[in-house]
Image: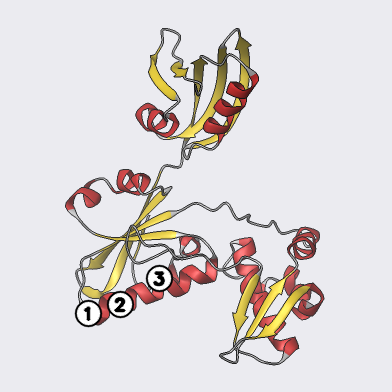
Amino acid sequence: MHRRCDFFRSCARWALILACVGFDAHAAQVVPSLYGAVVSDSDAQQAAQDAMRQVLVRLTGERDAAGDPALAALITGARRYVQLQRSTTAGATRVLFDASTLGDALSAAGRRVWGPDRPLVWVLLPQQEGAGADALRARLVTAAQARGLPIVIATTDATAAAAPLAAARRAGAAAALIAQPVPADPASQQWTLVASSIDTRWTCRISGVADLPSFASVLTAVRTAREVSEVTVRAVDADSLLLQLKARGNEAELERALANDRLHVIASNAHGELDYKYQAAP
């Protein structure tokens, strides 16, 4: 996907991936609360409504959520959902909404709540100096915090540019968003999104699962692996566990995602299954 011109006006859906955890691949910053916001208005009613507009964008993942007619009543009656509201030392107002009540109201309005488990996006910026670089990063931060989704920001190098998705995954991200200056207008950026959009099903046989604690440990390890989105237990045979997995990436990427100090890859067996050996703690 390629976009030219002002990214934050033209990239309608993928602008939603922008939130901030830092200015390089190792720095981190906490994403704003999904149910809270700090606004400049000191009037209680107006502050609650302004905060609700921000929160609805984060909760639904829709940049135009504040203008959604189905959600207009939530903005008008924002005070009904306030759990905590207080002034800050800078003269702003901090508003926190009740998660359960607001979530129920969104569901009643026919809108889904986008939960807190959000994909990390790796943003690759070109080498820039001075005010231009700072301005671009600041715009990323602003859009990022408005949408409540983490990113990692890195600067172009030869390895990352050649294999951006692999670099993104090494950073723990699900996708790479790459910025390149437009030759005819260096102040503008062309954005390319690289993501693995296809989940593949795999059959995985794990031996060495001899007792209930081992069974629980294996399932926890597999279910929390970054590439795995779905796990089904197909069979349990003596100390062997047969799983059906739905995961992103190829076989090598899945092997890396599953391998840890107790779960060791053996090979793909004659039945086309991924073979692993589980080593219980001594």
Q: Which mark is residue 134?
A: 2
Residue contact at pointers 1 and 3, CB within 8 angstroms: no
Identified by mark 2, the residue type is Asp
The residue depicted at 72 percent of the width and 71 percent of the height is: 97
The residue depicted at 39 percent of the width and 21 percent of the height is: 265
Q: Which residue is mark 3?
A: 140
CA neighbours of label 2 inside 10 A, class few (<14), some (14 to 19), many (20+):
few
Where disc 2 sits, the SS reads helix
Where disc 1 sits, the SS reads helix
Where residue 99 appears, as percent x and y from the top left, is: 73, 63
Identified by mark 1, the residue type is Gly
Viewer-nearest residue: 164 or 197: 164
Q: Earlier in the sequence, mark 1 or mark 3?
A: 1
Identified by mark 3, the residue type is Leu
The image quadrant where one finds the N terminus is bottom left
Q: Which mark is residue 130?
A: 1
Viewer-nearest residue: 66 or 161: 161
CA neighbours of label 3 inside 10 A, class few (<14), some (14 to 19), many (20+):
many
Q: Which mark is residue 79?
A: none
- Tell me if 42 is positioned left or right of 125 in this view: right
Residue contact at pointers 2 and 1, CB within 8 angstroms: yes
